[in-house]
């Protein structure tokens, strides 16, 4: 069995507010129309319904992260390898995916709290309309702490050996995947922050996570 799969799938089953491949195809043709009009399927799953991410994160044997490629909103090509040396939380999502929509604001709130630990948050959208779909979503949800990163070909779930989205993986500074969670969750909790920093293994800059925070950068340093 691949090490990329959760070691205890039953533990993540309650978190499966998650779209399968078949659901993704249906959603891409149906909900995408609604998303384009600003109706991001928000009524289907409430953020309050989501469990704490720390209860579903599955530690895995460290393995080299896949060669996941994406672009920023200007079309500049990027890959996970470009961020080697930083811890990463990579979230694969789409504006037409209800559990993705429910959890993304908590990921946006999480990003600045992880910055002192040299952990970057990379939300990779698989919307086929790219920035045209993501930009209005960010605006309507007042998301200012996350970069716009795009995989319009939708290769990310396959590369991460996932059956659907959302899928989130943690990557250490050496470029190794160390944990994953399939399904929506609330990431903006003390337990989640503690779990993420422990699994990735980075220390806060200056040894004081409540001190001044380094600026967030969309591009790798």
Image (cartoon, helix red, strand yellow):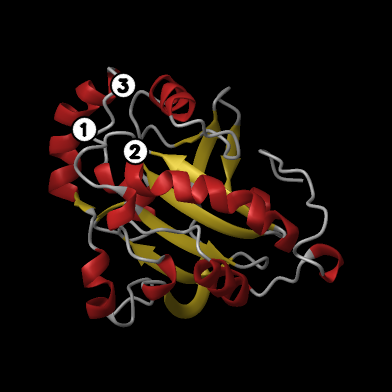
Q: Which labelled disc corresponds to residue 94?
A: 2
Residue shown at 61% from the left, 71% from the top? 200
Q: Which residue has dot 3 on it?
A: 38
Q: Which labelled disc corresponds to residue 28?
A: 1
Measure how far apart labels 2 and 1 are at the Cα level. Answer: 9 Å
Q: Indicate the secondary structure of the residue bearing disc 3.
A: loop
Of the image marks 2 and 1, the number of the one nearer the N terminus: 1
| Rendered position, 116 above or below 156 | below
| Rendered position, 66 above or below 41 | below
Viewport quadrant of the N terminus: bottom left
Residue shown at 77% from the left, 43% from the top? 215
Left or right of residue 195: residue 115: right
- The image position of residue 100, as x and y in percent, is 33, 46
| Rendered position, 184 above or below 78 | below
Q: Which residue sits furthest front?
A: 48
Mark closer to the observer (3, 1): 3
Measure how far apart labels 3 and 1 are at the Cα level. Answer: 15 Å
Of the image marks 3 and 1, the number of the one nearer the N terminus: 1
- The image position of residue 178, as x and y in percent, is 51, 73
Q: Indicate the secondary structure of the residue bearing disc 1.
A: helix
Residue 122 appears in view: no
What is the quadrant of residue 96 in the picture? top left
């Amino acid at each position: 069995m691949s090490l990329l799969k959760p070691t205890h799938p039953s533990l993540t089953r309650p978190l499966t507010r998650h779209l399968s491949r078949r659901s993704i195809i249906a959603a891409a043709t149906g909900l995408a129309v609604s998303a384009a009009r600003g109706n991001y399927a928000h009524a289907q799953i409430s953020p309050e319904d989501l469990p704490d991410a720390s209860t579903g994160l599955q530690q895995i044997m460290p393995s080299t992260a896949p060669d996941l490629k994406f672009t920023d909103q200007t079309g500049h090509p990027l890959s996970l390898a470009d961020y080697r040396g930083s811890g990463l939380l990579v979230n694969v999502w789409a504006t037409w995916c209800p559990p993705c929509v429910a959890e993304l604001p908590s990921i946006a709130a999480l990003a600045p709290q992880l910055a002192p630990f040299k952990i970057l948050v990379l939300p990779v959208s698989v919307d086929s309309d790219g920035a045209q779909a993501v930009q209005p979503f960010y605006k309507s949800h007042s998301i200012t702490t996350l970069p716009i990163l795009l995989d319009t070909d939708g290769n990310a779930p396959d590369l991460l050996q996932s059956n659907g989205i959302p899928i989130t993986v943690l990557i250490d500074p050496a470029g190794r995947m160390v944990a994953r969670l399939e399904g929506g969750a609330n990431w903006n909790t003390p337990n989640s922050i503690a779990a993420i920093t422990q699994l990735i293994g980075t220390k806060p800059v200056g040894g004081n996570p409540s001190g001044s925070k380094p600026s967030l950068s969309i591009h790798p340093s």
